[in-house]
Image (cartoon, rainbow, N blue to C red):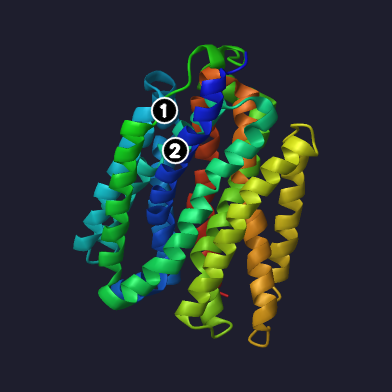
Amino acid sequence: MALSSQNSKERWFFLFIATLSQVSMAVIHLGIPALIPLIQDELKLSRTEVGLLTSVLNGGVVVAAIAAGKAADRFGERLIIAYGAMACGIIVMGMNWVAGFATLFPVLLLLGLATATSTPAGSKAVAGWFHARERGTAMGLRRMAIPLGGALAAMTLPSVALRYGWRFALAFAGLFAVGMGLAALFLYKEPPISSRRAEEGPVVGIKGLIQRRNIRSVIFFVFILGGAQWCYLAYMELYLTETLGFSIRLAASLLALGQICGVGGRVFWGFLSDRFFSGRRKPTLLVVGFLAILMTLWTSLFSPQTSSGLAFLVVALLGLTLLGWNGLYLAFVSELAGSRVAGMAIGLSNTGAFLGIVTLPPIFGFIVDHS
């Protein structure tokens, strides 16, 4: 069923509001990896503990992702988007009182619980406001919020932290998230029920979704790519400073470049699937995965003699692939499940992604520590 002309115009504004809210949460979520060298130095963390730090941060997302999806299906995405952003902002301010890994644990766990709200609620908003013929592009635009927030974090937070301390930098990011949550609460509107009905799909539970082979395949795919993505985010800056001898500022700039390429990738892959694959998400996801493998293998060839130009190129291409697939897979999942249970299906697949995020980075760090 077609949206009215007025709703057709409004949907881009509501997409903008939902995207801004997720940008603010991404500044926090990805700002912590951008500050890892400073946090590691002050709190005396090993590389294994750095990996565990990201696992604790993302472990809360694993725990809460399905519940957040169910909440978005039941209460609507507006409240979940708004309160999730405000909760992230308030919780991250608690970083001002941490003194070591033991006290980081509860703060990062709570932060992960709040962060879990952003993906199912925001993706459900796109599924409700946009038709299948443009959903890949719209989902890519919304999901570019994450690497965009990461790029903003990488470009601003290290500089602020070097001048005022990393705790102050994260508190500033927290205030930004609270403001964006309030904006979503008062400015976002949910789509009319009639616009959802054409693609509602059957009502199923978690068990019914898991029993579907296509859903299980997507979960396995995002488990691997999600873990690889956070190995990139957590360790690339350390790799560039330790192996290539880059300064923290230059390494952070390279990480920001990768995030910016991830922004472009999320829109590009969605547009490619809409226009050149006629809305077929699966072949596009396979292309992304293959290119990500090639870029990862290329990175393993780095050495102290590697030119900075080559490092820039590889980090950028890794951003395009490892950070660029998320919007495409979310469009795929929402279409496989149907809009009535899109939030729960996205929460389930997000659980798979964050299980990879939780388990693979510390394994990676352990291997590096002992090799």
**Residue linked to disc 2:** 18
Seen at 45% across and 66% down, the residue is 154
Quarter-of-image position of residue 283: top right
Distance from Cα at disc 1 to Cα at disc 2 = 9 Å
* N-terminal label among 1 and 2: 2
- Nearer to me, 329 or 210: 329
Q: Residue furthest bottom?
A: 305
Badge 2: how crowded within 10 Å, few (<14), some, or many (20+)? Answer: many
Q: Nearer the viewer, mark 1 or mark 2?
A: 2
- Nearer to me, 231 or 141: 141
Work out whether 278 lies above or below 316: above
Seen at 60% across and 22% down, the residue is 337
- Which secondary structure lies at badge 2? helix
Seen at 65% across and 76% down, the residue is 311
Left or right of residue 205: residue 166: left
Left or right of residue 12: residue 171: left
**Residue linked to disc 1:** 77
Seen at 57% across and 60% down, the residue is 260
Q: Quadrant of the C terminus?
A: bottom right
Where residue 175 sits in the image (x, y, percent)? 27, 53
Label tally: 2
Where residue 332 sits in the image (x, y, percent)? 65, 32
Where residue 38 sits in the image (x, y, percent)? 36, 74
Where residue 251 sits in the image (x, y, percent)? 52, 76
**Mark 1 and 2 residues: CB-CB less than 8 Å, in contact?**
yes
Question: What amino acid type should be assigned to the residue bearing mark 2?
Answer: Ala
Work out whether 35 lies above or below 360: below
- Which secondary structure lies at badge 1? helix
- Nearer to me, 155 or 29: 155
Question: What amino acid type should be assigned to the residue bearing mark 1?
Answer: Glu
Residue 310 shows in the view: yes
